[in-house]
Image: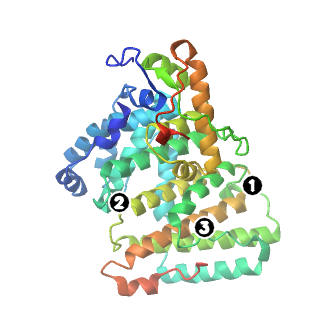
Amino acid sequence: MSNPKLPGNLMPLPEALRALPQVAPERSAWAQIAAELEAGNTQGAKITARPMHRVRTGARRRVRWMLPASLAAGLVLAFAAMAMLQHNGRHAPAIATVAQPAASSNANVANSANTLNVTNVANRDTPLEPGKGAQLHALQQHSQALEHWLRETSRSAAPLPGQDLAAATEIEDMIGLIDVQLGSSDRDGDLPLWRRRVALLEDLTALRYSRYSLAETGADAKSLTPTTWTN
Amino acid sequence: MSESFSHLEMPDSVIARAQAGELAAFEQIYRRFERPVYTLALRMLGEPEAARDVLHDAMLKVFQRIGQYRNDAPFWAWLRQVATNETLMRLRREHPTESGDEADEVSDPGAPPWVRADALALERALGQLPAMTRSVLWMYHVEGYSHPEIAEFVGKTISFSKSQVARGTARLRDLLVPATESVSCRIQSSLAI
């Protein structure tokens, strides 16, 4: 793969790296992408069955829109979740601020990627400690409420500017990664992972809310806003 | 050349057609960015199959969200950011223990060394670096991300980014010794770490 234009010339390392030739994959990925695009639509993301190693995308979709409950019920659950968390004191989730969703997201992904030994709560076969169980339940409820709000507002939200869109995409990735970890790990790390998941959802909610407020349905945005943020 | 990623603009009309759901427009975008995205992932990960997965996932993700894209920022910048994130996500998943140590900062080596532009030797040397070091080095020298930006990307400190670049540079210099002349280059102070 030598660059014929540069036959052994001395140059600074950065320039030499940039001079490396571009590479194409042996097999184009287009056919697979086209099939998946045709199977769904470009916004609804109805994606066809995928190889097992692509479970992350499925998890991401599940994260985004898996909870079809009413918004009112969701907000009630959110209130209940926060009340329980406050009652349980020291293990209150780390709530991200709404001011810096993008900035906090990268730290979140690193932390979540380093948090491994956790369990799939759906498969647990022994009871949790009482306090832990309540916290876990509260976090799950809060998570559901936030997801529901995101779903309800997504259709009428204004388009995101490039930077926000990149941040939103990244946050969704991180949530997907946490879901993979939740689905495949031991039980001890449950709470940290769920706290991280909730924090990320709050970041995403903050990001979406700013755009939703600017959309035509701005008057309704206030009434739909999750009221459990810690600003 | 890898730097051409940033020179690949897409006409607004193509973006608009893709936003309308036209498959041919998606393909046009894919064809235009296939190599830059794949190359970025391959250089950082060093594994062709993993790089292809990143290409697939990044492209699909951008296509699924293209309706939300506003052309207030270059399209390539958004796609590159998504691709970089996808690559780093995979790196963290597949090399979870390779995080490096933040405190072990390497002293500033000054300007980067000069090397012979033998692409094959350079690719081989790159392949011998730890994946995280290689990725940080690539993001810094080729993609042009700053140390604070890289620190954000990888969830580490700015010192970590600097030390990875310094280590990677020193290691590459060692690996390329037979083909590299020890030229003390002090003329590009803007490239100094």
Q: Residue at x 69, y 39 (%)?
A: B97
Name the N-terminal-most of marks 1 and 2.
Answer: 2
Numbered disc 2: secondary structure: loop
- Viewer-proximal residue among B90 and A3: A3
- Viewer-proximal residue among B137 and A40: B137
Residue A44 badge:
2
Asked if labels 2 and 1 touch by Cβ distance under 8 angstroms, the answer is no
Q: Residue at x 56, y 53 (%)?
A: B152
Q: Classify B53 as above or below A98.
A: above
Amino acid under disc 1 = Arg
Residue indicated by mark 1:
A187
Q: Classify A40 as above or below B27.
A: below
Amino acid under disc 3 = Val
Residue A6 badge:
none
Name the N-terminal-most of marks 3 and 2.
Answer: 2
Most extreme residue toward the right, as rendered? A129
Q: Residues within 10 Å of mark 3 (few under 14, many from 20)?
A: many
The x and y percentages for residue A1 are 39, 18
Q: Residues within 10 Å of mark 1 (few under 14, many from 20)?
A: some
Mark 3 or 2: in front is 3
Q: Residues within 10 Å of mark 2 (few under 14, many from 20)?
A: few
Residue indicated by mark 3:
A198
Q: Classify A147 as above or below B143.
A: below
